[in-house]
Amino acid sequence: MSISALIIDDELLAREELKYLLDSVGGVDVVGEGANGIEAVALIEEHNPDLVFLDVQMPGLDGFAVIKRLMERGQKKNGTATGKHAGPLPQIVFATAYDQYAVRAFDVNAVDYLLKPFDRDRVVEAVERVKGRMAGGAGPLSDSPIESQLDALLRLLNRPQGPSRAPQPAKLVVQAQNRLLLVDQAEICFAAIDEGVIRIVTRTFEGQSKCRTLEELLEQLDPAHFWRAHRGFVVSIDHIREVVPWFKSSYQLRMNDKQQTEIPVSRTQTKRLRELFNL
């Protein structure tokens, strides 16, 4: 069964990468693409798609504001419908660049999300979940589990985030040979994952993390200082020694460790790099 989908993201490279992955997965017909929230609302009303891949952070109307607007319009459909979007909300898969609070909110409310840079296996999993939900049927908008999940998500995200957020630990446990060391986050240059093992690199030594995934590691790191520059790497912004221009407008990061390791920046994270250093 082929399902219709929209891709909404203000980064062209992110849209192209997701479109490429969806084409390789199969079973998803991308009927349109948009670069901002205003276009998202118009495209959803025009195409009434089964599924929308919706970027969270966009200028102007962000992904959450798009959902609010669609829900407000949908609630007016009983006797006063205007516009083309009068059916249930489409399935929503959010895309986010590691706002850990938002990720936890998605998990709590069983709303699908993809972390950037996109991973093919996660794209496959998200599509299969959507197909499973569609096969189970969906009621009208007022009774839709999609709406209730999104409504609960928006309420949670609107809560004050300061005191309610658990602070990240100042130190990280790193295994070096037979020792378990408590390492200040400020000492960490970068982390890399290879065959399921996460390597932690500081300026003076290397060790391993007990975390199973980089997502789990990021939960323990201060998001103001650590950034997932590539699918396989988390870097400390404070330990980037040099930004090296690479081919086709891409970049590599030369880190401040002993080896001056060069780490690639994924296409979807190039915009973030330019924002960090005003490139």
Image (cartoon, helix red, strand yellow):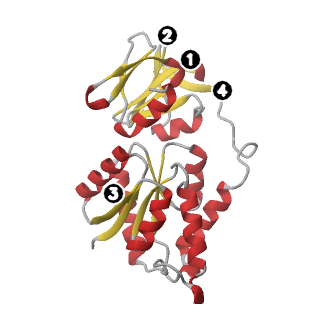
Assign a secondary structure to mark 3: helix
User: Which residue is depicted at the point 24% across and 57% down?
Assistant: 23
Residue placed under numbered mark 3 in the picture: 124
**Amino acid at the residue labelled 4:** Ala
Disc 3 versus disc 2: nearer the observer:
3
User: Which residue is depicted at the point 40% across and 73% down?
Assistant: 46
Relative depth, front residue between 42 and 213:
42
Earlier residue among tags 4 and 3: 3
Earlier residue among tags 3 and 2: 3
Q: Are dots 1 and 2 in contact, CB under 8 Å?
A: yes
Extreme-bottom residue of the structure: 79
Relative depth, front residue between 155 and 122:
155
Earlier residue among tags 1 and 2: 1
Report, in whole angstroms, how far the alpha carbon at label 4 lies from the one at label 3: 36 Å
**Amino acid at the residue labelled 1:** Glu
Up/down of 78 relative to 43, above or below? below
Q: Which mark is residue 187?
A: 1
**Amino acid at the residue labelled 2:** Thr
User: Which residue is depicted at the point 55% across and 84% down?
Assistant: 81
